[in-house]
Amino acid sequence: MDRKEAEKKIQELRAVLWENSRRYYVDNAPVISDYEYDHLMYELRDLEREWPDLVTPDSPTQRVGSDLASDYERPSVEGGTESRFTKVPHRYPMLSLSNTYSLSEVEEFASRAEKSLERSFTYCCELKFDGTGISLTYVDGVLARALTRGDGTVGDDVTVNVRRIANIPQKLSGKGWPREFEIRGEILMPFKAFEQLNAERLEDDEPLFANPRNAASGSLKLLDPEEVGRRGLWCTLYHIPSQFIDFAATHSEALDKAASWGLPVSPDRRICADIDEIEDYLTYWDTARKDLPYATDGVVIKIDSLAFQEELGYTAKFPRWAVAYKFKAEQALSEVLSIDYQVGRTGAVTPVANLFPVPLAGTTVKRATLNNEEWMRLLDIRIGDWVYVEKGGEIIPKIISVDLSRRPEGAVEPEFPKACPDCGTPLVKSEEEARWFCPNSTGCPTQIKGRLVHFLSRKAMNVIAGDATIDQLFNLGLVRTPADFYSLTKTQLLMLEGWKERSAERFLQSLDASRKVSFDHVLFALGIRYVGEQTAKEVARHFGDIDTLAAADVNELLEVPDVGDVIARSIYDFFRYGGNLSVIASLKAAGLRFSMDEGAVKQSDSLSGKTIVISGTFSVSRDEMKALVEANGGRNSSSVSGKTDYLLAGNNPGPEKIRKAADLGVKVIGEEEFFSMLPARNVPAEDAFVLKDDENESTLF
Ligand code: IVH
């Protein structure tokens, strides 16, 4: 390759890496695997080694991948939430690790270290946790600040969110901690919490997180700390910058101390004397990690002595005293039998490959997503191809690559449909979406049925009905819009195959009870694109009623926490479409709640005149606790002041609130004491719209 060609290739690689770094760190929606990303990076690194004068300081090989949207030209798809966190410089840069998939490179790392140190030393081997980086600062034993890695120099201040993570202590225990120090680690989303979150997102037709790492990173940057608290995030800490350590001579001793102060440090590390012991550790954890409750993507090998670390020093991007050995994700090889194009309730069309059944990580995989047309093109997939499938924590396996050497002759190139596979309407695609959509929202049967299923679903109107019922009602032409449910009669229901008096009555009763469902759930039930349960809650609370919301312009919508450009535009457009307005008018006429006040049922005056601040988590949601305060005549406030009567503290209350309450002499009460102040019938689970915990099946996937 001559210089000119090298220059061109370098430019290309930088552009691809840059774009994929944004997708990974900011959008939390990568379209290529870590393995592919790392290999593109190695290709660039090797070219730059060959042509050192072509290295520029802004090359991805010289910079830590940034999680700040402002570092990229295009804003985050999640909707401009990024700029709302304060940017704070790190006291010491937060670096990345040099990584490799090859054992021989680990051996080279070890022999380089041996050569340059010329004394005997040990390694500390640890798991490489697959989450998002965090730096915590403790001052006088109290958590003072939490910053994301950002671009390595400046991070986002996410302290309010980190305070909601259950295993991060607000106060240290034990003794001997420095007056002020930083400790770094990873915020993770355990597999269980990840599966639950994605199941909810599937039900809400919100884009799924590709893996627990993306989910952790997206959750950490939410603007609603309470929602962050609900996401079940977890933390593990693995690095104290040496500038803060005067209490230990080695990295592992420093971590032992940190653990003794109550900080979450993984016990799964091992001191290794040589490369053989390192390889034993790698082999052991490549299998054993599958039983861990959270994702790991490799092992980190560190020189344990802090003095030796200092001696080896750093490059611009990495320490020279550590290397990450990455595991390749578990994959299966199978044959593509056909490709389906599934239409969701929002009209999004997803290509899904039907595969020859193949075992992978404990289950048999028969179908795997191809995400969107762009991914299909990148893969250059054909029907009949042999493909590698990965699960990596995802609910839906994904096709990662095609084994071109096995391509059968005459393998057919799939054609992404130009028209909706269900109703035939030409598909459309906007600039910022990678997905094609069927725009026929009011005429496409799959979309209509999908919306009806969503409308009745548990977290929306909570009406007991399965997909089969909706199919029956739709096929007989009895229901086209959600409003039609409310004019159904018993006689009509008895016409349906298999329906009896009792089932018809139960269905009608359930519909009737749904008239009491609060406005935020009704808003969620309307199925506005990108408006999930949490966003609906925020929007309903912010605007109070549907008329004010319908009249809001995009700027007013942007004032709602967690609403960015994409969501604001979607809500705005929804209320500009006449068909939606007429459905809302009919639902109003049917007696559904379209204002927040309507749901506030007065229960008693027991808390009359009392101002209450709620902090921590309880056996019921905080929203329910707040509703109980109001229903019993009390007032909620968010900060403790001289006017506060009670601080209602649950598990993990904010330490500042506790301290302030103590300073001001405000009485602190717990959950039990709170309930004892209310009339006996106010049991926490009393919730008008909870009829039965009956999961509705989603029409998607
Ligand atoms: S040590 C000075 N230890 O992996 C470098 N990093 O791909 C300090 N990571 O940026 C980092 N597990 O966010 C270290 N046991 C571990 C780790 C770990 C995960 C992350 C970290 C780093 C990234 C590099």
Image (cartoon, helix red, strand yellow):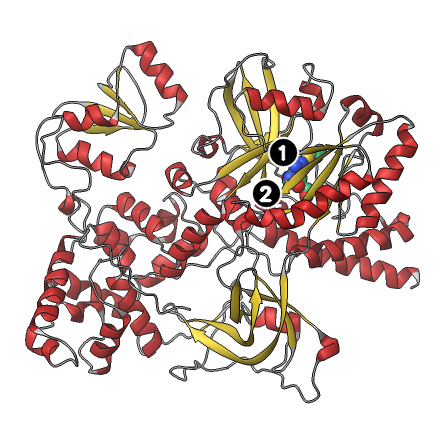
The front one of 278 and 107 is 278
Residues tagged 1 and 2 counted as in contact (Cβ below 8 A):
yes
Return the x and y of residue 167 as percentages of the image width and height: 47, 31
Depicted 547 relative to depicted 447: above or below: above
**Kind of residue sitting beneath label 2:** Leu
**Residue at (79% x, 43% y) in the render:** 57
Alpha carbon distance from label 1 to label 2: 9 Å
**Image quadrant for the N terminus?**
bottom right
**Residue at (6% x, 77% y) in the render:** 491
**Kind of residue sitting beneath label 1:** Val
Q: Quadrant of residue 304?
A: top right
Q: Is residue 496 visible from the viewing direction of this image?
A: yes
Q: Would you say 701 lies left or right of 312 here?
A: left
Return the x and y of residue 376 as percentages of the image width and height: 60, 72
Q: Earlier in the sequence, mark 1 or mark 2?
A: 2
Mark 2 surroundings within 10 Å by alpha-carbon count, few (fewer than 14), some (14 through 19), many (20 or more): many
Q: Is residue 221 visible from the viewing direction of this image?
A: no
**Image quadrant for the C terminus?**
bottom left
**Residue at (38% x, 55% y) in the render:** 200
Return the x and y of residue 582 as percentages of the image width and height: 20, 68
**What residue sits right under mark 1 in the picture?**
154
Q: Which mark is residue 68?
A: 2
